[in-house]
Amino acid sequence: MPPMNTTWPWSSQACATSGIEISGRDTSGMSLISRFVLSLVAILLFIILALAPVQANVIQAGSDVQSAIDAASAGDTVVVVAGDVSSFKVDRPITIEGIGGPVLSAALQKPAIKVMSDGVTITGFRIRGVGKDSTAKFNYYMQNPAAAANAALDDPNSAIVVKGDGVSLKNCSIFGAQVAISAEAVRGLVLQNMSMDSCDTGASILQSRDVLISSCHMANCKKYGLDIELSFDVRLENNSIVNNTNGGALLKESEDCVISDNQFSQNTFGLSLWNASHNEVKRNRADHNYYGILITAGSNFNNITDNSADDNSRGEIVTGFGIGISLQENSSHNILINNRAKGNFNGLEVSKGCQFNAVYANNASDNKHGIRLNENRNNLVFGNNFIRNEINAYENTSLNIWNTTFGNYYSDYDGKDGNGDGIGDESYSLPGPESQSFDFRPLISPSGVAALDFVALKEEVKRYAVYAPAVAALPTTRVEDGVVVISRKASSSPPKWSDSDSFDASAAPFLKETQL
């Protein structure tokens, strides 16, 4: 038997030996180096292959979209052409693109689209929703006990349900749903160029983070165009929120949100911040609402800047009633700066238990009241222009501060400026029952646009807001069964204006009964 050849076909004789000296050289070192190089090359090849983009496929779907989704892999695109198509569930990170506006229909307790995966993009669909029907819903669950066993029985009929992170919904229209889009406990949601019409609620965003809602249209909804609750880092920008029966957009118990460049028109409440703090509201337009922008129920540390609130006056309840921008119900440490309020019942108002707010460099003109303050203390109001209002500034049962080194401009002020420093020689008395306030340094001419120096404004508030708390704001104590109970007056909603001789709240039961 011939001797066995131990030389590997892809290696040299030297590489096939170990610990043998040839010509005075130790080949063991070469072997280790070679092995290291080969191992390194293998690792690099593995990394390159792992990081190389996977070739995505485009899958053409028929009316049965679900079958195409089930055949897709991560990163694929499913294309759906025009026509009626079946509802579907997405359980993998893919793109589903409607061409020509394919139509889906939701059913009772069955959304048209349910997104269960992260990283999904859906675009280009038209969806017919299902409205609220409590009787039909009860009958459905009675007839489908298995469905009832795994369902939250208070879930609305939603057209689209989102349960994944990093989901984008674009260029879709939804009509007639109880809730057009429902998302809860998600992150990175994008709604862009979406239309939600004639729903109970347009979009419901609950307990979510890092949400962008941009260039959407929410109209004719019975409850809210947009309902955002217990959420953080929401950006609401360039949207049109129009003719929603109760509220245009509600931001409730949410923080670090930016609401900018939106239109709120013909709603009951255009934009409402409800116990929502540390948010920015800027460059929005609010018109023909009962309340254009409402900050209420302990909403604190918000910046309200460069908004316009014009013609918020509606005749359905009380002729001419409407508020431009309103701070209410123990909302404090907010800054209102460079806003415009024109043609409202109250252009600006601060009402009931609000304190340490700065109202600076705003323009209020042609309103019933340019600004009205009711039952507050320690709000700083200066550098504003109050022009051609029936009552430029009004204060009721309050003690607020109306000037720093300068005050406000009032178009009905007729005092003189003897030394030409731009400050009137006589103080301006604030009208209103029990008013004890004066602007001691009224401006002779309107002031210009102010720089947004929030830090300086907060320091001014600290410096000038020195009144003691009102007695009604102090906690009360009582003893019940031997236990001391400490309580404060609770916020009420919505605001009532029974103390106003210009507005009879009893004639407006809707405002007394509506709950945000």
Image (cartoon, rainbow, N blue to C red):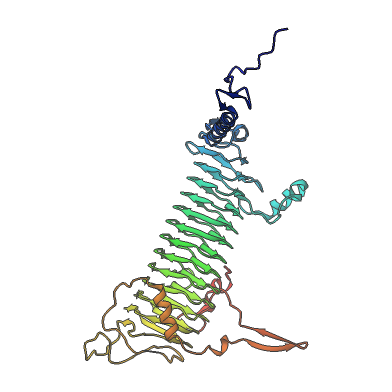
> Looking at the picture, how far across and down is residue 479, in whole percent?
73, 89
Q: Give whichever of 227, 70 is nearer the camera.
A: 70
Classify residue 455 as left or right of residue 152.
left
The answer to whether residue 38 is above or below residue 478 is above
Classify residue 485 by image quadrant.
Answer: bottom right
- The residue depicted at 49 percent of the width and 81 percent of the height is 355
Q: Is residue 201 visible?
A: no
The answer to whether residue 509 is above or below residue 283 is below
The answer to whether residue 501 is above or below residue 237 is below
- On the rendered image, what quadrant is the N terminus found in? top right
Classify residue 106 by image quadrant.
Answer: top right
- The residue depicted at 60 percent of the width and 17 percent of the height is 9
> Looking at the picture, how far across and down is residue 510, in whole percent?
55, 71
Q: Give whichever of 205, 176 is nearer the camera.
A: 205
> Looking at the picture, how far across and down is residue 464, in whole percent?
42, 86
Q: Give whichever of 138, 150 is nearer the camera.
A: 150
- The residue depicted at 26 percent of the width and 80 percent of the height is 445
Most distant residue in the top direction: 1
The answer to whether residue 492 is above or below residue 402 is above
Classify residue 475 by image quadrant.
Answer: bottom right
Q: Give whichever of 5, 335 is nearer the camera.
A: 5
